[in-house]
Structures are given as structure tokens and as C-alpha cells.
Image (cartoon, rainbow, N blue to C red):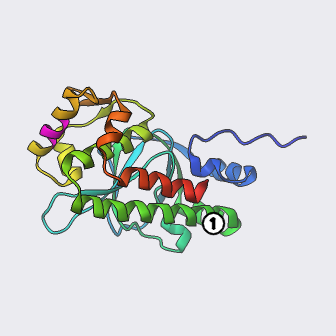
């Protein structure tokens, strides 16, 4: 009997694996519906489950003292939550919350650990992804420190638009302000300018990107730099 082709998982990391490895991984996974705002783990928590988003988007945040959490990384269908297991680290370095509701492939840490032991290619793929994620975190740190609110907001909207495949974003100006680490009024002003220039449409907690070229023209260089890092690593 011929081996049946592996079905497209709609997660790019899984799709990059050899067919046999992808089948083994998907056989251990279950579909998970991730709801907006759900905390998947706190910083330093043991890894009990690993998630490969398909339509969901996960935000990685860090908090210092009594300050609001600041978003420093985003995971969508291009990545996974729990990749540090490929380094033998069984704890989450950052808090993870669901930024965009949707689905993910979910697998227990124990099952995933077994797959890592059996597949060198899976381990190598995750090492490459961890390198890309480290670059993303470094760009975010520099971006938050040096770039203007409007440029950072444009970058964030493009990142989310990539991962939601153009679907409207469900969020408020307050939530956006917390993610960017700025005052709500600053987000309101920046978003208002974008709406006036017909780059976005904001209605009752929903933002839709209308003009990617417009957003790209005002986004900081961190956005294309992150894309280039991913393409260098994964062709």
C-alpha cells in the first residue's frame, strides 16, 4: 500500500518537516480552540503543553515590577509555543496569552519530548525557529526603546495582519496601548491618523487593515528585518 501524503497542517513549522515526521507529530496532537485573552502560561511555568497555531495568534509578554505587560514577541502559523524544549529547557521564558482567537495543534510535553528524541530533523527545525524568534525579540526590544508610536503601531498591525491572513483584529485602544507600552491617548492619535489616511478602519473594537502598502510606508525597519530573518533561515 502506498504511503498517503501528509495533510497540510496549516502550520509552517510542521509543513517543513519530512512527511513521516509530520505524520508522527500530528498523530499525537489534538485540535485546540484558543480564546482571546486566555493566558496559556506564566513566565517560568513548566511546559505542560506545546502549541502549533494554525489560525490563532499568541502574544509573548514581559512585565517588570508593577508595570503593565509589554509585548515583545508574536507567534502565529509560522511558529510554535514551547520551542525551548528543543534546547532541553522545560520552562516557559515569557508569559503567553492569546492575542487572536483561533485554532492550534496541541500536544502534551511528554509526547513532544519523545518525538524530539526520535527525530533529528524536528530538533533542527526548532533550533532554526528559535534563532528566528530570538531575532524577533531583539528587534522588539530595540523597537520599543527607539521608535515612534505610529511606526511601532504600523509594524504591529502588519505583524498581526500577516498571522490572521487579513481577518479583522478584535481589540481595543487600551489593549493596544498595554501591548505597546504607551498611553492609550498615544494609540488613539496614531490610529486616528491611519484611519484618516485610509490605512485602517476601526469600528467597535475591530480593526481591519485597508492598505498594507500604506502601513509599510510608515512602519519602522523592524518589520522588514524580521521578515528577512525568517526567509534567511527557512528560504
Relative horizontal placement of residue 228, taking residue 235 as reference (left or right): left
Residue shown at 25%/45% (left/top)? 153
Question: Main SS type for the magenta part?
Answer: helix
Answer few, some or many: residues within 10 Å of disc 1's Cα (few below 14, many 20 plus, some between 14 and 19): some
Of 135 and 228, which appears nearest the observer?
A: 228
Of 94 and 24, which appears nearest the observer?
A: 94
Tell me where residue 19 appears, x and y as whole percent: 74, 49
**Vertically, is 219 above or below 211?**
below
**Vertically, is 23 above or below 35?**
below
Of 192 and 181, which appears nearest the observer?
A: 192
Tell me where residue 225 appears, x and y as whole percent: 42, 55
Residue ranking furthest to the bottom: 88
Residue shown at 19%/27% (left/top)? 196
Residue 2 magenta-drawn?
Answer: no
Tell me where residue 96 appears, x and y as whole percent: 35, 56
Q: Which residues are magenta?
A: 187-191
Location of residue 201 (image quadrant): top left
Location of residue 42 (image quadrant): bottom left
Q: Quadrant of the N terminus?
A: top right
Q: Which residue is mark 1?
A: 124
Residue shown at 40%/59% (left/top)? 136
Q: Does residue 102 appear in this view?
A: no
Of 209 and 30, which appears nearest the observer?
A: 209
Relative horizontal placement of residue 175, taking residue 59 as reference (left or right): left
Residue 190 magenta-drawn?
Answer: yes
**Vertically, is 100 above or below 232?**
above
Residue ranking furthest to the left: 185
Residue shown at 29%/64% (left/top)? 142
Relative horizontal placement of residue 192, taking residue 153 as reference (left or right): left
Q: Secondary structure at mark 1?
A: helix
Q: Does residue 200 appear in this view?
A: yes
Amino acid at each position: 500500500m502506498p504511503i498517503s501524503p501528509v495533510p497540510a497542517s496549516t502550520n509552517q513549522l510542521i509543513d517543513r518537516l519530512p512527511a513521516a515526521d509530520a505524520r508522527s507529530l500530528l498523530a499525537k496532537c489534538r485540535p485546540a480552540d484558543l480564546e482571546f485573552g486566555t493566558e496559556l502560561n506564566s513566565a517560568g511555568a513548566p511546559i505542560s503543553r506545546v502549541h502549533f497555531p494554525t489560525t490563532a495568534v499568541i502574544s509573548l509578554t514581559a512585565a517588570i515590577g508593577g508595570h503593565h505587560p509589554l509585548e515583545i514577541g508574536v507567534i502565529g502559523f509560522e511558529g510554535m509555543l514551547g520551542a525551548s524544549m528543543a534546547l532541553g529547557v522545560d520552562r516557559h521564558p515569557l508569559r503567553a496569552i492569546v492575542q487572536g482567537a483561533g485554532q492550534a495543534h496541541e500536544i502534551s510535553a511528554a509526547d513532544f519530548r519523545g518525538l524530539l528524541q526520535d527525530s533529528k530533523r524536528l530538533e533542527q527545525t526548532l533550533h532554526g525557529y528559535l534563532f528566528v524568534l530570538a531575532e524577533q525579540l531583539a528587534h522588539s526590544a530595540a523597537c520599543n526603546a527607539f521608535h515612534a508610536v505610529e511606526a511601532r503601531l504600523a509594524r504591529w498591525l502588519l505583524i498581526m495582519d500577516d498571522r490572521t491572513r487579513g481577518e479583522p483584529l478584535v481589540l481595543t485602544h487600551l489593549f493596544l496601548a498595554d501591548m505597546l507600552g504607551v498611553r492609550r491617548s498615544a494609540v488613539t492619535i496614531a490610529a486616528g491618523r491611519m484611519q484618516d489616511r485610509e490605512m485602517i478602519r476601526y469600528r467597535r473594537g475591530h480593526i481591519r487593515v485597508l492598505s498594507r502598502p500604506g502601513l509599510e510606508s510608515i512602519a519602522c525597519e523592524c518589520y522588514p528585518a524580521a521578515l528577512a530573518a525568517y526567509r534567511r533561515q527557512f528560504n
